Amino acid sequence: MTRTDAGLPRYEDAVATFRIEDEIARLDGDPATGINAYAECCGRHTGQNRLALRAISIGGELRQFSFDDLADMSGRVANLLRGLGVGPGDVVAGILPRIPELVAFVLGAWRIGAVYQPLFTAFGPKAIEHRLGYSGARLVVTNPANRGKLDEVANCPRVATILGPGDTLPQGDVDFHAALAAASPDCEPVMRKGDDLFMMMSTSGTTGLPKGVPVPLRALLAFGAYMRDAIGLRPDDVFWNIADPGWAYGLYYAITGPLLLGIATTFNEGAFTAKSTYEIIERLGVTSLAGSPTAFRLLLAEGPEAAAPVKGRLRVVSSAGEPLNPEVIRWFDAHLDAPIHDHYGQTENGMMVNNHHGLGHSVRTGSAGFAMPGYRMVVLDDEGRELGPNQPGILAVDIANSPLRWFDGYHQAETPAIVGGYYRTGDTVEYEPDGSVSFIGRADDVITSSGYRIGPFDVESALIEHPAVNEAAVVGVPDPQRTEIVKAFVILASAYQGSPELAEELAQHVRKRLSAHAYPREIDFVSELPKTPSGKIQRFLLRKAEVEKRKG
């Protein structure tokens, strides 16, 4: 494979030479004959004194765990689960913060061929009840901070609780630490097939109830390829993905992905703040950082002085969850001296389109990047026809020509997005002549005003370039003359106050940056924006509120 001047494999060569057999050869097992997720992500890396986890407690204490440590802990978890009647294919759920026991629990479940279901710690009882209901989980592991929610869950399965000093064990619960201390660390991994499950995820549920997303073991191939080609993870990196493992990007790429490659991951139990993030980057010497645009915009809002102590420390930064605003890219380059690349994926498929840190190709600001080798991505019109460059349509996976694709449909539910040989993501994009993908918006986020189609992302990015704006969300609201007009909801930087004059200044700023039809004709200054627990802006809630207001 030829290499670029930067010493990276060329993207075009990686696509041309991709063979699924080569990806399978990177594993210890084989999806066709026998594979175990614990063995791939831990067992094969033992006996080498290799670091697996850096864990910072809520009080700031740093503890480090080797793969051998995780093997011991997960073996005890595996025997605990077996003693409770959990077997291959059974689902076990965790509602836990970012603590070492979470990693041990996940690996222990995988060790006996069980399926792990993440439950985000911000979920309330109803959200938990719905997810446990469709998964049929046999056990939930939690801590005292989250245990009370389970009392309101109908038909709640058996509970194991991780107690801290002074905590009392609820009646009927399993004492997690005591049970581990009494269990043997020896447990032979149970081999499974590539189509057998090892995770049960859920959709975000922004429209309707969340649906189960079964993740088969063959998804390990795609997770490893993403870490290698897009994250560009190296053995000498200090890697930190700040995403919560209660969600796909965290579980796929903060736990599974790095451990699969035999490289240590990082946990911080404390809540995200810009200040603590900078401190941890400096303290641990983080070289590869991953997270969401929401988190990176908060780093930007903290200002250049806060970034100065770690400028030049980060080798690469990876962003996922929402499109990355160009202003964030420029700011990271100027004040952190770090290339931050946009990556695109979904719970249903993992990451599929990236500006790859590990492959050499052109990177255009505002682009989601190129299809990851192993995926063929296309843009479809409403009739399912493939479109060429500069023609907006729905981004889709060409199923037959995407050997890394693993999603076959929702758990016990219809999957209308899979039809005609394609999986439709629901996101409106267009291909550029160079083959890169430009994100326009969710299909239901695109604004139609006076016959023009306007992507909210472009307007939001233009707003964020103004020094007064920390965050922005843009929606289309009904208008009798124009069908819709662009309305922006803006969180201001602390030095600015909202006023009609500032609103007009921002509108004209966008008009000058974009076009005469794509600027916000209405601007509301707000203190917060509705977001999912994983940090994605819920534009549909803003739009719904505006529609109701205009009806009244």
Image (cartoon, rainbow, N blue to C red):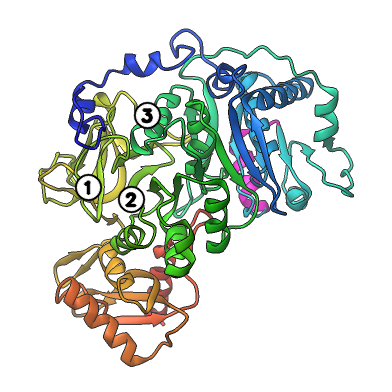
Mark 3 vs 2, N-terminal side? 3
- Taking the spot 48% from the left edge, 38% from the top edge, the residue there is 253
Mark 1 nearby-residue class (10 Å; few <14, some 14–19, many ≥20): some
Residue 136 within the magenta-colored segment of the rendering: yes
Location of residue 516 with respect to 367 vertically, above or below: below
Find the magenta span and give its range: 125-138
- From the image, tell me which residue sits under label 1: 363
Alpha-carbon span between mark 2 and mark 1: 10 Å
Disc 3 and disc 2 in contact, CB within 8 angstroms: no
Amino acid type at image mark 2: Pro
Callouts 2 and 1 close, C-beta under 8 Å: yes
Residue 446 image offset from top left, x and y in percent: 26, 61
Which residue position is annotated with label 3?
Answer: 225
Q: Is residue 311 left or right of residue 331?
A: right
Mark 1–mark 3 distance (CA, rounded to whole Å)? 19 Å
**Quarter of the rendering containing residue 463:** bottom left
Where is residue 505 drawn, in percent x and y? 27, 86
